[in-house]
Amino acid sequence: MSDNIIEVENVSMRFNLYKEKVDSIKEYFIKLAKGTLHYEEFWALRDISFSLGKGDSLGLVGRNGSGKSTLLKLLAGVMKATSGSVRVGGSVAPLIELGAGFDMDLTAKENIYLNGAVLGYSKKEMDGHFDKIVEFSELEEFLDVPVKNFSSGMFARLGFSIATVGVPDVFIVDEILAVGDFKFQEKCQDRIQSMLKGGTTLLFVSHSAEQVMELCTKALWLDGGKMKMFGEVSHVCEAYANS
């Protein structure tokens, strides 16, 4: 039995990019049935393999479109790989897209309970966590405001506060710390460091090499969907910065 909490083996992810415009679902199915729906294959990831143990912290680096977000979505269980295998053990708290999991018409208070349920917490557990979430997010005055009126920074505060109120086995963060003020970013980094000490495994994407080096011990460099380099964080970030 492996001690790794995450195992990615020979993972590839293909998307079909349709060439022509389809104006309705009906037209889509007619063309699909006739075999006249033409598309190009786009490989977002090609043959990715790595593993992480409990408490490891991995930073994903690479230019826009290199496959970082796609890989995180596979690890979060949002998408299934075209080929290869992804194994993630334990509970997963993903923060992949701003506003994901929120109902825009509900208030911040209602969304705290909704997101808690998505993460597997009971209402009773969320009752116990509620005050800590509100305190950390610094959104006390906006609890009864529908989240459709929130700024991106407020979304980040609320999403991060909910996702980190427990201690998940795996925490996945995609660029979320780039939103909002510097003081709150520091607060988030401190909480992540505390989670790492508690044994949480981190997967982290940031355009800031400084943030990656501060939070992560390992790094994976993706280039055009392929794994260019995997290893100790300073070596990978240095090679990426000089590319």
Image (spheres, helix red, strand yellow):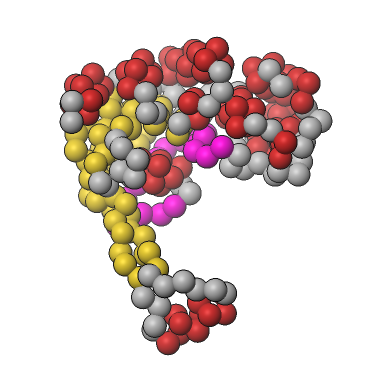
> What's the magenta region?
79-98
Q: In the rendered view, does 88 fall on the left or right side of 106?
A: left
From the viewer's side, name the closer residue of 95 and 65.
65
Q: Is residue 165 above or below residue 48?
A: above
- In which quadrant will I find the N terminus? top left
Q: Where is residue 215? Give x, y as percent.
A: 38, 18
Q: Where is residue 161? Give x, y as percent.
A: 61, 24
Q: Is residue 41 above or below residue 128?
A: below
- Name the image quarter holding residue 180: top right
**Residue visible at 22% across and 29% down?**
240
Which residue is most to the right? 144
**Residue visible at 70% across and 44% down?**
103
- Name the image quarter holding residue 159: top right
Residue 171 located within the stretch drawn in magenta = no
**Residue visible at 76% across and 41% down?**
106
**Residue visible at 45% across and 31% down?**
175
Q: Where is residue 110? Give x, y as percent.
A: 76, 36
